[in-house]
Image (spheres, rainbow, N blue to C red):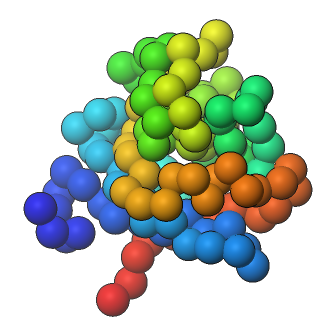
Amino acid sequence: MSSASVSRKQIILEIKGKTKIRCDLKRHLSPRTVGTILRSLPLEGHAHFLGKNIAYFETMVDSGSERSTKKFKKGDIAFLSSAGSICFFIEDVSSGKIMTPIGKILENIDALKDIKSGDVFCLYEETA
């Protein structure tokens, strides 16, 4: 599928001053939540961690739970509605928190292991 696909939208997760990581947001996983996030781009916030395997940043996005789950694979992207946070899974996780799946990291997942609390995440649409 091309990045112009209706069901997938290619975005960039930039860790400011460090790296850029290509990601896909997938509407079929959670159409309402993904649509809300896409309309809110660009998003920016400071990096935080849930344990060692989930990096996230808080947003002002307000979207309830949708097709929620607690199990995620390395490279998954999820939305934690209770905090308005976008979460990136560094390893496979069975989380204690229910989250909405929204996409997948396409490359360079291990770059997330090098971030520090306080690094700045910026999420935006890829442009040609």
Quarter of the image holding residue 30? top left
11 lies above or below 103: below
Report the side of 126 relative to 14 (left or right): left
84 lies above or below 106: above
38 lies above or below 100: below
Total numbered labels placed on residues in the image:
0
x and y percentages locating residue 103 in the rendered image: 38, 44
x and y percentages locating residue 48 in the rendered image: 79, 43
The foreground one among 19 and 124 is 19
Quarter of the image holding residue 119? bottom right
Pick the quarter of the image with the N terminus.
bottom left
Q: Residue at x 54, y 22 (%)?
A: 93
Report the side of 2 relative to 52 (left or right): left
Q: Is residue 34 visible?
A: no
Q: Residue at x 37, y 57 (%)?
A: 106
For this orientation, the residue located farthest to the left is 1
3 lies above or below 9: below
Pick the quarter of the image with the C terminus.
bottom left
x and y percentages locating residue 13 in the rendered image: 55, 64
x and y percentages locating residue 55 in the rendered image: 68, 42
The foreground one among 89 and 65 is 89
For this orientation, the residue located farthest to the top is 96
The foreground one among 5 and 112 is 112
